[in-house]
Each structure stands twice: as structure tokens, then as C-alpha cells.
Amino acid sequence: MNTLITIIKVLPLIIDLVRGLEGVITQSGQGQVKLAIAQEVLAAAYDEAKDVAGNMPRETWIKIATNLICKIVGIFNAHGIFKTSK
């Protein structure tokens, strides 16, 4: 249950991170670069403020956050929030 509560608490911050990277890196085909940057930011947040992820191990935090980012980007792409080139 603690993991779920942590995810709910950080979800708006992860969405902001995704939107911010999308606004800064606007070139098409840069999804992996954006994801790598997001992972570095999330790892740094964990290292600097370990309570950001509750009592989750670092690897679990990065894995869960990465999965959330991928889902968020997929939803935003599907609904036209992020423009994709075809």
C-alpha cells in the first residue's frame, strides 16, 4: 500500500517532468533521449531525497517511474496531447 501511495503522490511531478522534457526537446524521434534524461533526474531525486520514493529501493523506484513515464507518454500520444510524426 505504501508503494501505491508514493506513486499517487509523485504522479503529478512525473507528468510535469514528461511535459517539461517534451517542451524542451521538440525534435521528433528523441523519445529515448527524453526517457534517459527523465531517468537521470529521477535517480538524482532519489539520491538527494531518499524519502521521495518512500522506502522503495532505488532500482524499484526507477523501474516504476520508467513504466509510469512510458504509460503517460503513450496516453498523451494516443489523445493527441503530444504530437507525433508519422
Image: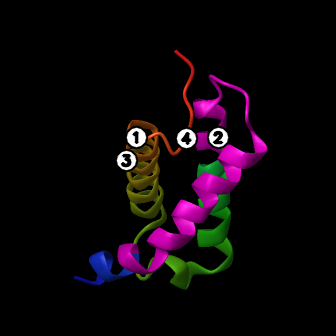
Q: Which residue is mark 2?
A: 34
In the picture of the structure, the residue carrying the numbered disc 4 is: 82
Pointer 3 or 2: first along the chain? 2
Q: CA distance from mark 3 to mark 4?
A: 13 Å
Query: Which callout, 2 or 4, points at the residue further toward the start of the chain?
Result: 2
Q: Residues within 10 Å of mark 2 (few under 14, many from 20)?
A: some
**Residue 15 falls within the magenta-colored stretch:** yes
Residue 83: percent from left, percent from top: 57, 34
Q: Label 2, label 4: how many angstroms apart (C-alpha)?
A: 13 Å
**Does residue 42 appear to the left or right of 24 in the view shown?**
left
The quadrant of the rendering that contains the N terminus is: bottom left
Residue type, numbered disc 4: Phe
Q: Verify CB contact (< 8 Å) between mark 1 and mark 3.
A: yes
Q: In the rendered image, which residue does mark 1 sit on?
A: 74
- Of marks 1 and 2, which one's residue comes earlier in the chain? 2
Taking 38 as reference, is 14 left or right? Answer: left
Density class for disc 4 (Cα within 10 Å; few <14, some 14-19, many ≥20) is some
Instruction: Report the residue marked by disc 3.
Output: 71
In the displayed structure, 33 sits above or below 38; it is above
Disc 1 residue type (three-letter): Gly
Q: Magenta region, mostly helix, strand or loop?
A: helix
Q: Is residue 56 magenta?
A: no
Location of residue 86 with respect to 14 vertically, above or below: above
Q: Is label 2 or label 4 in front?
A: 4
Q: Residue at x 73, y 28 (%)?
A: 27
Give the SS element for disc 1.
Answer: helix
Q: Which residues are magenta?
A: 7-36
Residue at 68% over, 76% down:
48
- Lower position in the chain sequence, tag 1 or tag 4: 1
Counting other residues with Cα less than 10 Å from the Cα at mark 1, is it few (<14), some (14-19), or many (20 or more)?
Answer: some
Where residue 8 appears, x then y in whole percent?
37, 77
Residue at screen point 38% across, 58% down: 64
